[in-house]
Image: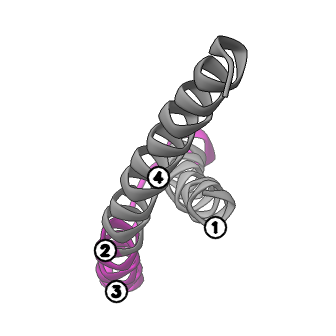
Amino acid sequence: MDIMDKVFDKTRAENEATRIEILGELEARQVHITADLKKAGTLINQIDQAISVLEFDFATEEVCQVIVDMYVKIKSALNDAEIAGAAV
């Protein structure tokens, strides 16, 4: 075996070790993402329930729209996080 073969084998082994390490990190991250999405889903359900019993007694429609916009942003962010988590 010449020096080029040894260098090639060493590089291949190092690359494989790095690949295995990265896969392990991605798997650990996926576990955290899944758990966080479940918690976020629970939180969104709690927000849904809380909003459903609130009385929106504002004098202007604009203020109601602020509340609705905030809620939509929360739901949209959860959806984005779910898509990102699935992509990992």
In the picture, the disc for residue 35 is: 2
Q: Secondary structure at mark 1?
A: helix
Q: Residues within 10 Å of mark 3 (few under 14, many from 20)?
A: few
The amino acid pointed to by label 2 is: Ala
The part of the chain drawn in magenta is 35-63
Relative to 55, residue 74 above or below: above
Of marks 1 and 3, which one's residue comes earlier in the chain?
3
Q: Nearer the viewer, residue 80 or 59?
A: 80
The number of numbered discs placed on residues in the rendered structure image is 4
Q: Residues within 10 Å of mark 1 (few under 14, many from 20)?
A: few
Cα gap from disc 2 to disc 3, whole angstroms: 21 Å
Q: Residue at x 50, y 42 (%)?
A: 63
Relative to 62, residue 26 above or below: below
Of marks 4 and 1, which one's residue comes earlier in the chain?
4
Which residue carries the number 1 mark?
86
Q: Secondary structure at mark 4?
A: helix
Q: Nearer the viewer, residue 52 or 71?
A: 71
Q: Nearer the viewer, mark 4 or mark 2?
A: 4
Which residue carries the number 3 mark?
49
The amino acid pointed to by label 4 is: Ile
Residue 76 drawn at (x, y percent): 63, 56
The amino acid pointed to by label 3 is: Gln
The amino acid pointed to by label 1 is: Ala
